[in-house]
Image (cartoon, rainbow, N blue to C red):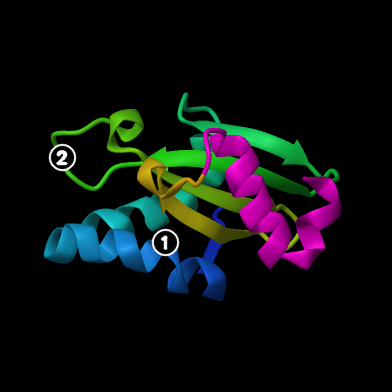
Amino acid sequence: MSIKYSVKTETFAESHYLKKISKKYKKSFLVPWSAFKLMLQKFDLMLERDNTNAIVKIDDNTTICKTEFKIMPNESTKSSGNRCIVAQDKIKQEIKILLVYHKGDIQGTNETRWWKRMVKDNYKEYKEYL
């Protein structure tokens, strides 16, 4: 049986690249994004999928993860280029959306280094772990 998590989009995630992605897809964004957030509620099941990876286990209860999502029905999650960095908190049963971006948003050549820097710079509570 999977735990149902509450899903919270952090202010930084909302006001940066997520806003840009929603403008890119316009009206076709809202329904798939809502569906993706519903999927995040069953995060334990998402971790069993190929496109969701635990990146850093902070302790027994908190893990930083990277997942992929799609907006358009004719694209795959990987080829869409849309990525989401989340923090899973098992005690609070909460998923925090820390960063949402498209591969085209990356500055530099190393995607992992780029998003880790974004999380370190904007979430002090995770800085020492990334």
Q: Badge 2 is on which residue?
A: 73
User: Which contiguous range is marked in magenta?
Assistant: 108-130
Residue 92 rendering spot, x and y as whole percentages = 71, 63
Sequence-earlier tag: 2 or 1: 1
Q: What mark, if any, has residue 17 been given in the picture?
A: 1
Residue 29 in sight here: no
Place residue 124 in its image quadrant.
bottom right
| Position of residue 98 in the picture relative to residue 121 (left or right) | left
Disc marking residue 62: none
From the viewer's perspective, tell me whether residue 11 is left or right of residue 37. right
**Residue 80 part of the magenta-drawn span:** no
16 or 14, nearer to the observer:
16
Classed neighbour count for the residue bearing mark 2: other residues with Cα under 10 Å, few (<14), some (14–19), many (≥20): few
Question: Who's the residue at 54% across and 54% down the image?
Answer: 4
Mark 2: secondary structure: loop
Instruction: Please check the rendered image and state whether residue 112 is part of the magenta-colored stretch, yes or no.
Output: yes
Q: Quadrant of the N terminus?
A: top right
Q: Residue at x 55, y 49 (%)?
A: 85
